[in-house]
Image (cartoon, helix red, strand yellow):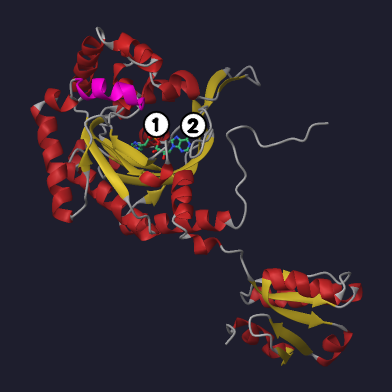
Amino acid sequence: MSTLKAVRGTRDLLPPETALWNHIEAVARAVFARYNFGEIRTPIFEDTSLFARGVGEETDIVSKEMYTWEDRARAQSEKSQSLTLRPENTAGVVRAYIEHKLGETGQLQKLYYIGPQFRRERPQKGRYRQFFQIGAEVIGPPSAGSESPLRDAEILEMLATLLDELGITGWTLQLNSVGSSADRARYNEALRAALEPIAHTMCADCQRRAVTNPLRVLDCKVPEDQPIIEKLPRIVDLLDPASVEHFAAVTAALDAAGVPYTRNHRLVRGLDYYTRTTFEFTHGGLGAQNALLGGGRYDGLSEAIGGPKAPGIGFAIGLDRLVLTLQAQELNQESAPPQADAYIAPLGEAMNAAALSLARELRRVGLAVELGDGSFRLKKSFEAADKTARCIVILGEDELQSGILTVKDFSTGTQTKVPRADLAAFLAEPSK
Ligand code: HAM
């Protein structure tokens, strides 16, 4: 019989690496709290039409990467329904915003999320079919200031702070504006027209995209196509005056705050809901999948899925890619194997029950304890303890009766007799 494995594009995350994941999530939560964001948790699956209408039917995500199935009705009162594992979280957050009438508070909603997303992409380093995002959205009625360019700048400044606090060095903020949805549509047509006579000289993907989704031609990485793409029309030349002004205000605020960025005219992003500001933070160490995170403004998304006018801006960080970057930077000391304060070695199986009771005593006062097994010979207990804990505590019949335990500290090599009543305090002292 063949051995079962994790499904292609999915992975198990094991200790000690999970400690690094937890560390990143804790830093992100702490940064979000300082910017007054609250956590939202939306379902892992949603009605398929949410993504079709929100992210866009023509996008790669919706047209070929979603995990979609027909959920059969279980009772006459139910209808069968097309469901989809969420490929991203922005549409779900905006759906929740509409469903819970969060706009009626009149306040900006500042929401963050951490969780798995699913896309049937071709797996490679930094690209998985189940991956994790840390994201945030700022959304609200225009009266709450949701259209202000200051919101864009604040989000970008927060991201720069978060990456700095995580110790990520060498990131680049790529910034662009895709204008209003009318600007975007005009640009799409301009590209289509410009590509028509030349597409046949380009790669097969570009030839296809020139017809189906000309904006995606800008993502092409084939070296021979680059000189052609550089000469294509640029969206900056088609922006309406209000979008130009908005973008200028965003960059002025970034300049004032000292957040560095580069203008990337080709950054149009792969989701249809974007308007005006779009951005990515890239990192050279990531190889082909170099986007650490991406985001932008989506002033029409709420209306596209049947809600009130609720402009917004947000981002999602690829947590898998953040982990890869930190690992490459060797900043992952946090992920050293977890070391317990003590390993309790019962001498003989008859001591097992007493050892559990001692472990309970120590764990209840906050110590990390690894509980051995009385069936081990002492040598084996020592070997196991040396790998997992700072000290070994030996518990035999004599120790139990006398209440005096023998503790060996591996880092100093010293052996000490400690009364049981003092044991917790002794173990809590880091070795000298
Ligand atoms: P996105 O650019 O599709 O945007 O994804 C954001 C980030 O998720 C990417 O930059 C990348 O780091 C990570 N990512 C995407 N696909 C994969 C994958 N297959 N494997 C590993 N990592 C991946 C969004 O998802 C938008 N919802 C962002 C947003 C929020 N825009 C506004 N608000």
| Residue 103 in view here | no
Q: Position of residue 383 (x, y in %)?
A: 77, 71
Residue 334 vs 119, above or below: the answer is below
The first of marks 2 and 1 along the sequence is 2
- What amino acid does circle 2 point to? Arg
Residue shown at 83% from the left, 31% from the top: 1
| Residue 236 in view here | yes
> Element type at marker 2?
loop
Q: Nearer the viewer, residue 264 or 359?
A: 264
* Residue annotated with mark 2: 86
Q: Position of residue 46 (x, y in %)?
A: 49, 29
- What amino acid does circle 1 point to? Ala
Residue 124 in magenta?
no
Residue 193 vs 175, above or below: the answer is above
Q: Is mark 1 within 8 Å of ligand 1?
A: yes
Split into 4 quadrants, where in the image is the C terminus?
Answer: bottom right
Residue shown at 32% from the left, 46% from the top: 110
Q: Mark 2 touching mark 1, by CB under 8 A? A: yes
* Residue annotated with mark 1: 91
Give the quarter of the image for residue 163: bottom left
Q: Is mark 2 within 8 Å of ligand 1?
A: no
Magenta stretch: give its range: 221-232
- Ligand 1 positioned in quadrant: top left
